[in-house]
Amino acid sequence: MNLFKNRPFALLCFIFIATSVVAYKISLKAKFIGALFFLLCILVCVTVAFVFKRFRIRAIFCALCAVSILLPILSQAVLVDMRREKALSYSGERILKVLVVDDGYASAFSSEYEVIINEVDGETVSISSGLICDFSGELNVGDIAYVRAEVHAVGEELNGYTRNYDEDIYIQALVENTDALVVISRGNLNAKIRLGQLRDKIADYMDDTLGEEPSALARGFLLGDKKDIPTETLRDFRRAGVSHLLAVSGLHISVIMGALELLLRKLCAPKGIRCVILSVSALVFLALTGFAMSAFRSVLMILCVYFSYLFVKESDPITSLFASVAAIMLIIPHSVNDVGLWLSFLATLGILSVYIPLTELWHRRATKDVRGRFRAVFEKVFFALLLTFVCNTFICIVVWSVFGEISVVALISNPILSTVSEIFTIMIPIGALLGNIPVLGDMLVWCVSVLSEFICLVCELFSSVGGAVISLRYGFAGVIITLMSISLAIMLVIKLKRKWIVIIPPIAAVLAFSVCLGVYEFINRGKYKSVYYADDSNDMVIITQGYSAAVCDISSGEKSFSYGISGIVSDNMATEISEYVLTHYHKAHISSIENIFRSMMVRKICLPYPEDLSEFEIMANIVILAAEHGVDVEIYDNGEGIYLLRDMWCAVIANREGDNSHPEISVIFGNAEKIFSYIGKDCGDTQFLLEIKQKSEHIMRGRH
């Protein structure tokens, strides 16, 4: 497809982006050695250009390539590695002075904040961090507080739990009780907080005008503000493969800017004036999104296009795309690790390099015999399917390496919601601005509300389909995706006589994956895989079959322990929890189960019958959480059989003999072929347990 033909600047930007990725992974020492080497290369190229005029152009281009490699190495070393090492040196229990800049999540049982650490044990610093409270915190944006917290490296502690921030946050502070937190000042503002307050005012205005539920989704579409969207709705969007609709990117910005440009054209504004107004509007829009990376990429690309319009007749979108991403990585070096930026970049690259050429080829060669509405409808559906297929093909390697699963219903859900989403995005600002006008405003608000409900309903329907999401953690999946990505990259760079050949690698990959998955399912049909997972005194048995998992929780409800469940389930190729069995009650189970509901698709939770009032209160809170997240609830008696997956069952036996209020837990699992059991650490060798041992093929002696 000759991606870099006659695009030298795009090639330089590509070298810069590729080097940024490599530099992010290598050590600080290797970065400095590489920097010295490429600095020497630049000096050699400059010398050759000065001495040998014949090789001047090649030497200058080689020098520019060396500069494109040198810059990301230096920026990564200075702005990422050194700052990370400084931040990580504060691991351990510390006394922190923090400024709250954003409230990421809050519930009745736990709270999370984004903070700037101003002091560590009295030492003045300035470090961005996450603050996680295992209780309902009372912090507000702008508060300055002293906290006694356990400081952890992000992704290295708390069972691999990684808070997904857009900023360069390398540590997170865990506060376990309210006595460790003291607010000393309120109402402290900086630029980020003021911008957040402006977004909050816009949110309040939209809530008043559009209504709270439509406004929550509208702000997700328009501003990327997802904090008021119910977690089950976010889960449905993810499983339906349309999460990109809630990440402000090229789709949203092009719709808004396109509508604004159309209005300016109707007002007969000159070309130069239009470019200036659109550029300023794009920057204001970017600020309102909180400078999200996907929006950042889209706005910079638009600015490149508008800037080129002022000086040349045509701009090159591919060069603008590479230039915008390279500029982001130069300005914000840690953005190389931002998944949203990569998804936005690769999807846009697929549209520009494959989708647009293929649609142009279709229009040139399509038969003219079929006329009228049928052809128009067919082309619209075909192009929507093609667009979804191309975008998913280009982002597939990121989805595989980061998420480990992919939505198979996205090929249908995206075409259905694409046009509706464009209309919804246009209607949001119109409805918000004119919503207070009698009659007209009521009609506009009603339209926004209906579109919002329709989008959520479609996502919920596709999400509830069994097998809506397929795991990519099979060994053959990585091989297929890697080979497809390499072959696709080669085809983009070389010249192809027939452009449609570029679609062969992804089609071959889909066929190969389908065959391998079919063979795997045939070989493992009806087979179960059980995993016993222990962390200190927390135990868990996970049984997987196909894309479903059954979880038996035998823990004290430590929240940090629950972070590992989604990883264990997905590592065993399951994408949802069909049954979550709780064996007994601890107060901490409320926050840990809430975390699981937020991160995983859970169909049903099975709760033991409470023995006293305190257990009843815990059960009631869990039932409320289940209702909020659309999870079915089943209450079982001690020793009662519970059906799991297709033809499995389990029975929880809680022995409460003696003065010890904590029960001794045993769990029997079985199907028509075999029985295996879990026996807790405190369970003695009673006659009943001896019988269980005799009948069980396998016995797990637990720690709990």
Image (tube, rainbow, N blue to C red):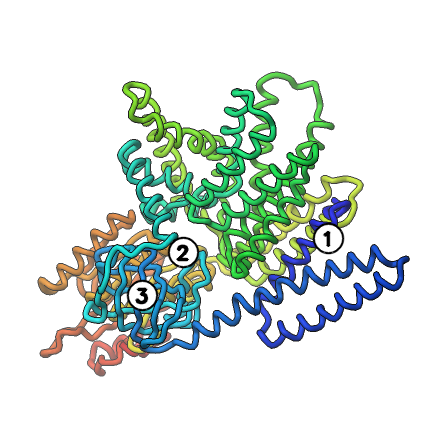
Q: Which residue is mark 2?
A: 548
Residue 396 versus residue 602: which sits nearer the camera? 396
What x and y, as percent, mark residue 233?
35, 44
Q: Marks 2 and 3: which is nearer the front?
A: 3
**Mark closer to the observer (1, 2):** 1
Residue 65 relative to residue 657: left or right:
right
**Distance from the alpha carbon under mark 1 to that under mark 3:** 49 Å
Distance in Å between CA atoms under marks 1 and 2: 37 Å
Amino acid of disc 2: Ser
Could you tell whether 401 is left or right of 618 in the image?
right
> Which residue is drawn at the image coordinates 41% and 64% (left, top)?
162
Amino acid under disc 1? Ile
Identify residue for label 3.
98
The correct choice, above or below, for 435 with respect to 67 in the image is above
Q: What kind of element bears circle 1?
A: helix
**Residue at the far top in the pictured view:** 372
Residue located beneath label 1 in the image: 490
Kind of element beneath mark 3: strand
* Earlier sequence position, callout 1 versus callout 3: 3
Q: Earlier in the sequence, mark 2 or mark 3?
A: 3
Query: Can residue 523 be seen in the rendering of this structure?
Result: no
Q: Can the viewer see residue 262?
A: yes
